[in-house]
Structures are given as structure tokens and as C-alpha cells.
Amino acid sequence: MEKIDNYAINLFRRTEVPLSRIAIFVVYFWFGFLKIIGVSPAGPMVQTLFERTLNFMPFEAFYAGFSFFEIIIGILFLIRGMERLALGLIYIHLITTVLPLFLLPHLTWQGFMVPTLEGQYIIKNILIVAATAVIGSRLKPRGESLPANN
């Protein structure tokens, strides 16, 4: 049993960063693409939040930019050496995605501590924060080389 345990731990250590990078890419690229082609279930909530906060430009222009922003974040997580930029951009994005929990409670909560489907969609971003922590924790300080499993 100890042999299996050691094998699993070593496997997790070798794959934690690549799997985190791929998972973030899939989520951000996929969801951004759904917005671009106009079939994202998050579209109405994004529009409602936009109307309450950034209503100084046409929504269509904002939405297209926001969609491409998500896709770019996803792609950056696949490119070695772009991790710091990707981490900075994803945290900006994550801040914007949590806003509906506070600014649009009628869309995100059905009761105290009982999220709607949209609320669950937002709260699950805690997993993305955890994955970015794994990636960020493996970065070397500037000037040092990257580890092999990045």
C-alpha cells in the first residue's frame, strides 16, 4: 500500500502544475468562446452587471472584449514564461466575476447561503483560485530558471 501511496503522491507532484494550467485554459477558452458565439448562459447576468456598473460604452463592444479577455487568459496559461501575466489578468477577471454575488443578489441567491445556479457558477471560482495558487507557488523568483514540470 505504501508503494501505491508514494506512486500517487509523486504523480500528483509531477502533474499538479500542468493539469492546473490545462484546466484553467479549458474553462477560460471554452467559456470565452461561448460568449463570442452568443450562446453563453452567463450572458444575461454579464449584461445586467454591465448595466449597473459600466454603462458608459456599448454593451456589445464590452462583451466582445470581455470574451476575448477570457480566451487570452486561457491561452496565456499554456505558454511557459507567461504565468505572471496570466496570474495578474486572471485575478482581475476573478474580481469582476465575484461582483454579482454582492451587486446582483436577486440573480445569485435564493436565500441566506443558498446560491442560485448562477451563484454556484460564481462560487466555484474558488477552485480556480486554488489552481492559480498551485501555479504561482511553483514560480521561481525572477532571474532563476523554471522547474521542469511547469
Image (cartoon, grey):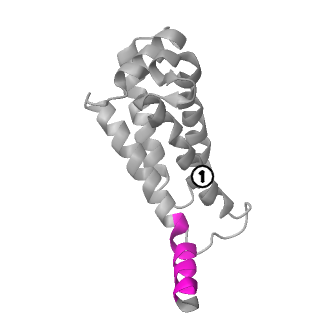
| Quadrant in which the C terminus appears | bottom right
Q: Is residue 58 left or right of residue 79?
A: left
Residue at 54% x, 75% y is: 14
Q: Is residue 139 left or right of residue 131?
A: right
Q: Is residue 99 above or below residue 31?
A: above
Q: Main secondary structure of the magenta part?
A: helix
Identified by mark 1, the residue type is Ala
| Quadrant in which the N terminus appears | bottom right
Magenta region includes residue 8: yes
Looking at the picture, tell me which residue is in the foreground, 133 or 90. 133
Residue at the disc numbered 1? 130
Looking at the picture, tell me which residue is in the foreground, 88 or 101. 101
Looking at the picture, tell me which residue is in the foreground, 90 or 83. 90
Magenta span: 4-17
Q: Is residue 129 above or below residue 117?
A: below
Q: Position of residue 114 (x, y in %)?
A: 51, 29
Tell me, yes or no, if residue 79 can be seen here.
Answer: no
Residue at 44% x, 36% y is: 121
Q: Residues within 10 Å of mark 1 (few under 14, many from 20)?
A: few
Tell me, yes or no, if residue 72 can be seen here.
Answer: yes
Residue at 36% x, 20% y is: 44
Magenta region includes residue 110: no
Residue at 59% x, 21% y is: 102
